[in-house]
């Protein structure tokens, strides 16, 4: 055979081989590519990325160990939605769950349960725990406290390489924190459940700071709730669960509208009783003379008011210890200024200035305990409307503060039996069953009339159209959002559940016509719109979110649950206050303990704003809101 014919044959064989399938000509099986996992995306991790995963596994075990030692509060607000032609979807039903969870008893168990036991009663918050086990007949899916609590833990027992596969996706920023993203799927040897989804590992210490996916069954196709869980850096090197968002879409809906959405918040990791005024502030003064015998005597009325004050202090302290009240904050002082200004503008003299605190829960309610006014976080959030008039949110807030100011001025006080501290020595789970703090219907009727008089004598007398619009908007949503309008311990905004009239309903005619299509009219905000809660200190801080203009009526979402997006940052230790000179007087208002009151400007749970791409090692600058958006440490709208 000539050399030319030999090479021609080789070329012909190569051409044939390229056109015929490998299995048809008996090519060795070892040349076949290994089939790719259909649920995995991304790239095989590099050595450096594998090292980061190994650190995350170790850190996750340490986080679980820390959580086991805590008993935080977990609150879930859930809304089932229905399609709407104009607004895409609107609330159909809602549910509110609130539970202090002892993770030492539930973490690590395959099927832990935080619902009440047969002999344990209904728990310590009314209208909450008794619904956990009776929800399946109300909603399309079965919801309970167990499932929602699992959403703040990645995998408490089996998060390791023996049970999970990891694929690298990309690097990104969450706020000023640099993270690496990995897709995670359980191996076949994970007998039951497991997390399917994406994890975000911060690159400084290797902590998982966010995970997004589902706690699944045996297959990825099994129906389970999908969630987005976030953690914040509460102490050096310690990231703990702070919030999570849940969403499911309508399976048979062509527009793919949302079927169910829920938001969960976690706080109370450090539940400590705040110190009383003057505690630990002893000052040694040289050449001091005893003038105690020259002190003015207390009148009978002064003694009565002091007795009421003692009962108030005992109850406030007990509520704070149980995790229901915020630690003292700048926003509390803002609300107190509003309350006292309303009194001053009406030329009313009070011997004791009014104070304010924030209930850390979502249901819309307010309360007066002695001279302290309580407003729920959900109420404040939904009142802080963004409009072209910066006075609108302030007028809204002043209206419901005035309702409780009226209770104080009318003498609708707390039962003074709580001046005896022993009456408050009982477990948290029954605390709020033993303290009837809501006012009677007759007291609320009288307070509503008095509040209108106070508002008409205040600087807000020409701005009462805004709270009137707020109540109109709430009237549209009050029936489907029944749980949101059921007060936990205080006064709800509605009189009763039959006709859904409001205590301050006389303001409704002042609001004009409610028009969802009018983008200059914003009657009420979504939940979590104005305040955030530091899950470690229990302080509330005003959001500094970027202003988002309304583009359609769908953007309004009054009283609705919205997704969580935190602008993460690393913990910064509070700056110690400068030592006072010898002989200086102690501050009038004592702050919470150092562990529960960071200085202004320290790291707190992140603002809910979209992430901005930042260069490595730098923090993106906060975006300044326009003049119409609320400013930090000032009343809403100023």
Image: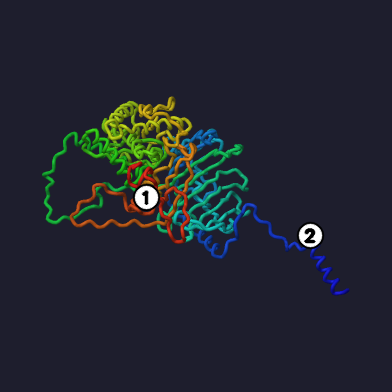
Q: Would you call the spot at circle 2 few (<14 residues within 10 Å), some (14-19), or many (20 or more)?
A: few
- Identify whether 542 is placed above or below 21: above
User: For residue 537, which numbered disc appears in the image?
Assistant: 1
Could you say where residue 327 lies in the image, as x and y percent from the top left? 34, 46
Could you say where residue 152 lies in the image, as x and y percent from the top left? 49, 49
User: For residue 19, which numbered disc appears in the image?
Assistant: 2
- Identify whether 483 is placed above or below 579: above
User: For residue 635, which numbered disc appears in the image?
Assistant: none
Could you say where residue 184 lies in the image, as x and y percent from the top left? 57, 54
Residue plotted at (78% across, 58% down) = 21
Q: Toward the viewer: 407 or 68?
A: 407
Query: Is residue 1 toward the left or the right of residue 409 in the image?
Result: right
Q: Would you call the spot at circle 1 few (<14 residues within 10 Å), some (14-19), or many (20 or more)?
A: many
- Dot 1 or dot 2: first in sequence order is 2
Report the quarter where the C terminus lies.
Answer: top left
The CA span between labels 1 and 2 is 70 Å
Q: Is residue 46 visible?
A: yes
Residue plotted at (16% across, 55% down) = 285
The kind of secondary structure element at disc 2 is helix
Q: Toward the viewer: 370 or 429?
A: 370
- Identify whether 291 is placed above or below 423: below
Q: Toward the viewer: 513 or 247?
A: 513
């Amino acid at each position: 055979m000539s050399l030319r014919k030999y090479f021609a044959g080789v070329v012909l064989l190569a051409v044939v081989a390229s056109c015929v399938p490998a299995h048809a000509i008996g090519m060795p099986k070892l040349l076949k590519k290994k089939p790719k996992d259909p649920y995995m995306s991304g790239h095989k991790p590099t050595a450096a990325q594998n090292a980061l995963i190994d650190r995350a596994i170790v850190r996750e075990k340490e986080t679980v160990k820390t959580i086991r030692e805590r008993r935080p509060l977990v609150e879930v607000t859930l809304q089932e939605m229905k399609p709407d032609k104009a607004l895409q979807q609107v609330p159909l039903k809602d549910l509110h769950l609130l539970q202090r969870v002892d993770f030492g008893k539930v973490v690590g168990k395959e099927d832990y349960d935080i619902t009440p036991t047969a002999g344990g009663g209904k728990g310590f918050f009314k209208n909450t725990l008794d619904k956990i086990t009776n929800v399946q007949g109300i909603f399309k899916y079965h919801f309970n406290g167990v499932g929602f609590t699992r959403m703040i833990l990645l995998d408490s027992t089996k998060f390791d390489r023996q049970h999970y596969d990891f694929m690298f996706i990309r690097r990104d920023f969450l706020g000023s924190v640099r993270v690496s993203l990995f897709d995670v799927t359980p191996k076949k040897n994970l007998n039951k459940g497991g997390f399917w989804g994406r994890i975000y590992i911060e690159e400084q210490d290797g902590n998982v700071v966010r995970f997004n996916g589902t706690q699944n069954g045996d297959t990825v196709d099994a129906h389970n709730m999908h969630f987005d869980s976030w953690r914040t850096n509460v102490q050096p090197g310690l990231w703990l669960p702070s919030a999570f968002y849940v969403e499911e879409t309508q399976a048979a809906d062509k527009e793919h509208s949302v079927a169910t959405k829920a938001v969960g918040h976690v706080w109370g990791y450090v539940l400590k009783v705040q110190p009383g005024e003057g505690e630990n502030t002893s000052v040694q003064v040289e050449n001091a003379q005893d003038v105690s015998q020259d002190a003015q005597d207390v009148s009978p009325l002064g003694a009565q008011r002091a007795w009421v004050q003692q009962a108030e202090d005992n109850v406030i302290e007990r509520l704070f210890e149980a995790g229901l009240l915020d630690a003292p904050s700048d926003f509390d002082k803002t609300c107190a200024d509003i309350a006292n200004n309303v009194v001053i503008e009406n030329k009313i003299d009070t011997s004791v200035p009014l104070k304010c605190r924030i209930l850390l829960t979502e249901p819309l309610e307010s309360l007066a305990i002695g001279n302290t006014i309580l407003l729920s976080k959900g109420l404040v959030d939904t009142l802080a409307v963004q409009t072209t008039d910066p006075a609108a949110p302030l007028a809204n807030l002043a209206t419901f503060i005035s309702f409780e100011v009226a209770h104080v001025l009318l003498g609708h006080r707390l039962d003074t039996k709580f001046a005896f501290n022993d009456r408050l020595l009982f477990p948290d789970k029954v605390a709020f069953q033993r303290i009837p703090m809501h006012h009677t219907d007759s007291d609320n009727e009288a307070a509503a009339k008095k509040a209108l008089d106070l508002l008409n004598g205040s600087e807000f007398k020409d701005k009462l159209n805004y709270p009137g619009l707020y109540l109109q908007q709430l009237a549209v949503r009050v029936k489907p959002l029944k749980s949101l309008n059921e007060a936990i311990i205080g006064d709800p905004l509605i009189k009763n559940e039959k006709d859904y009239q409001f205590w301050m309903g006389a303001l409704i005619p002042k609001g004009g016509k409610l028009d969802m299509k009018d983008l200059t009219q914003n009657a009420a905000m979504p939940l979590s719109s104005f305040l955030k809660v530091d899950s470690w200190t229990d302080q509330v801080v005003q959001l500094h979110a970027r202003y988002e203009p309304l583009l359609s009526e769908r953007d309004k979402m009054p009283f609705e649950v919205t997704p969580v997006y935190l602008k993460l940052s690393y913990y910064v230790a509070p700056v110690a206050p400068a030592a006072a000179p010898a002989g200086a007087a102690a501050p009038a208002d004592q702050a919470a303990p150092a562990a529960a009151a960071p200085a202004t400007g320290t790291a707190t749970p992140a603002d809910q704003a979209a992430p901005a791409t930042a260069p490595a090692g730098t923090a993106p600058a906060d975006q300044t809101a326009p003049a119409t958006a609320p400013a930090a440490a000032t009343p809403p709208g100023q």
